[in-house]
Amino acid sequence: MKPDTSEILISSDEIRDMVAKVADEINSDYGDRPLLVIPVLTGAFIFAADLVRLLKMPVEIDFMKVSSYVGQTSTGILKINKDIAVDVKGRDVLIVEDVIDTGRTLALLRDMLKERGAASVKICTAFDKPARRVIDIRPDYSGIEVGDVFIVGYGLDLDGRYRDYGDIRIVKDNEEQ
Ligand code: IMP
Ligand code: MG
């Protein structure tokens, strides 16, 4: 069945206000401290593009593409599909995510960046689904909480589609979740 994406959950106006709120928090926490922003591909590309333009400190951006799978260990294994080129040693790092669901991928990514010697690693997400969490991980900056629904738009996809929507839609008749 073709998924129904006609229901708007979060409007583009609400998203704009959310990005401004998150940017304000980051600006007031970091002040003039330079920040290494690491958006997680692919979903975070639109949020990150909007966010960094509102940040006031010197910002460097490099992208990672990661996924996780549950292997022999209960924490799961991080697969790096695309790594950053910069050295994180001694840097203040801000991971930018589209949405936190189970939290598995992000927990592994955060731990890896700490192991590489980052001075600090904080997490910023546009959307958060706390009810779906498997790993206890809380974002330092969180835009809008959503319930147990599958959402698309503003960078988020279903099988590679719908990332280009300017608002967030709920997917009905979805078999992913
Ligand atoms: P997790 O937190 O490790 O379960 O993985 C979160 C990742 O799953 C996100 O970065 C998204 O790429 C994807 N994801 C989770 N929920 C949704 C959704 O509702 N729409 C689109 N992608 C999602
Ligand atoms: Mg993602």
Image (cartoon, grey):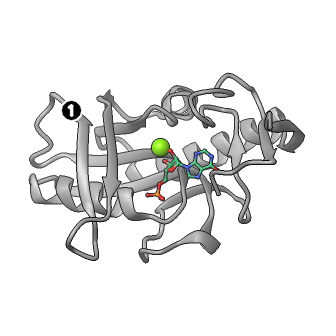
Tell me which amino acid carries mark 1.
Ile
Q: Residue at x 73, y 48 (%)?
A: 174
Q: How many marks?
A: 1
Compared to residue 115, the image places residue 130 above or below, namely below
The residue closer to the viewer here, 160 or 50, is 160
Among all residues in the image, which is located at the extreme front?
1
Among all residues in the image, which is located at the extreme top?
164
Measured as percent of width and height from the top left, residue 101 is found at 54, 60
Measured as percent of width and height from the top left, residue 95 is found at 37, 47
SS under mark 1 = loop
- The answer to whether 32 appears left or right of 175 in the picture is left
Among all residues in the image, which is located at the extreme right?
7
Q: Residue at x 57, y 34 (%)?
A: 47
Q: Residue at x 28, y 60 (%)?
A: 108
Where's the C terminus, which quadrant?
Answer: bottom right
- The answer to whether 146 appears left or right of 44 in the picture is right
The residue closer to the viewer here, 67 or 103, is 67
Density class for disc 1 (Cα within 10 Å; few <14, some 14-19, many ≥20) is: few
Compared to residue 136, the image places residue 21 above or below, namely above
Q: Residue at x 53, y 72 (%)?
A: 133
- Quarter residue 87 falls in: top left
The residue closer to the viewer here, 72 or 15, is 72
**Residue labelled 1 has its Cβ within 8 Å of some atom of ligand 2:** no
Where's the N terminus, which quadrant?
Answer: top right
Measured as percent of width and height from the top left, residue 122 is found at 36, 57
Residue identifier under label 1: 84
Measured as percent of width and height from the top left, residue 34 is found at 28, 38
- The answer to whether 152 appears left or right of 100 in the picture is right
